[in-house]
Image: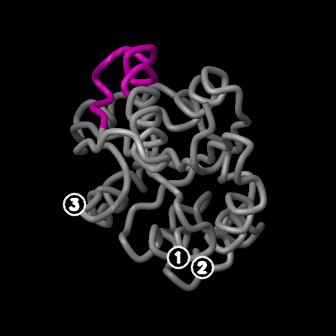
Amino acid sequence: MLHPPVVVMGVQGSGKSTIAELLASRTGGRAVDGDRLHPADNVARMAAGVPLSDADREPWLRTIGDLLDAHRGDNIVVVCSALRRNYRDLLRDRAPGTVFVHLSGSFELISERVDARTHEYMPPALLRSQFASLEPLEPDEDGIVIDVAAAPVRIVDEAVAFLDEHARRVSGGAASSR
């Protein structure tokens, strides 16, 4: 089934990369880690524990939006924190119809996960600023919020069910709610 471009979003440690890979595999698509698209200056700032500004993020978000749009029809799944509404709006402006899978969890759970892993440039200290910046999906945004306390296979099952229903709705099938 053909799905719209998908962004797996959330704070660091929410499992975005894992879920994106599994989701792409289940949908016959391709996963892209948006972190790999950051300019070197952004990576250096984050590695130093400095949160990015909106101006720092804008070129990166444009690149991701252009990638989503260019691979429309390929069941592309891109990892991108997309923490704020204006970031998601920019992505949708560049790639209309993009939907979001927001991986959500408590600060305590995600903090435990972040402390137990090694990331090449995202220090655990940035987690608090990411939670402070997070603007959850609003009712008029096309997407789903999924609790990360579930097993990855369950998270992917829920995301695929949402994407399948979304595809039916967009193609004229039965209406559904989020």
| Sequence-first disc among 2 and 3 | 2
| Sequence-first disc among 3 and 1 | 1
- Residue 113 vs residue 33: left or right? left
Q: Which residue is mark 2?
A: 58
Q: Nearer the viewer, mark 3 or mark 1?
A: 3
Pinpoint residue 164: horizontal percent, then vertical percent.
46, 32
From the viewer's side, name the closer residue of 82 and 12: 82
| SS for callout 2 | helix
Q: Which residue is mark 3?
A: 139
Tag on residue 72? none
| SS for callout 3 | loop
**Three-letter code for the amino acid on which mark 2 is drawn:** Glu
Q: Which residue is mark 1?
A: 90
Would you place residue 22 above or below residue 136 in this image? above
Q: CA distance from mark 2 to mark 3?
A: 24 Å
- Residue 63 vs residue 92: left or right? right
Q: Which residues are magenta?
A: 146-158
Name the residue: 36% across, 71% down. Answer: 85
Name the residue: 26% across, 58% down. Answer: 136
Q: CA distance from mark 1 to mark 2?
A: 8 Å
Q: CA distance from mark 3 to mark 1?
A: 17 Å
| SS for callout 1 | helix
Pinpoint residue 155: horizontal percent, then vertical percent.
39, 23
Dots 1 and 2: beta carbons under 8 Å? yes
Name the residue: 37% across, 50% down. Answer: 143
Pinpoint residue 117: horizontal percent, then vertical percent.
52, 28
**Three-letter code for the amino acid on which mark 1 is drawn:** Leu
| Sequence-first disc among 1 and 2 | 2
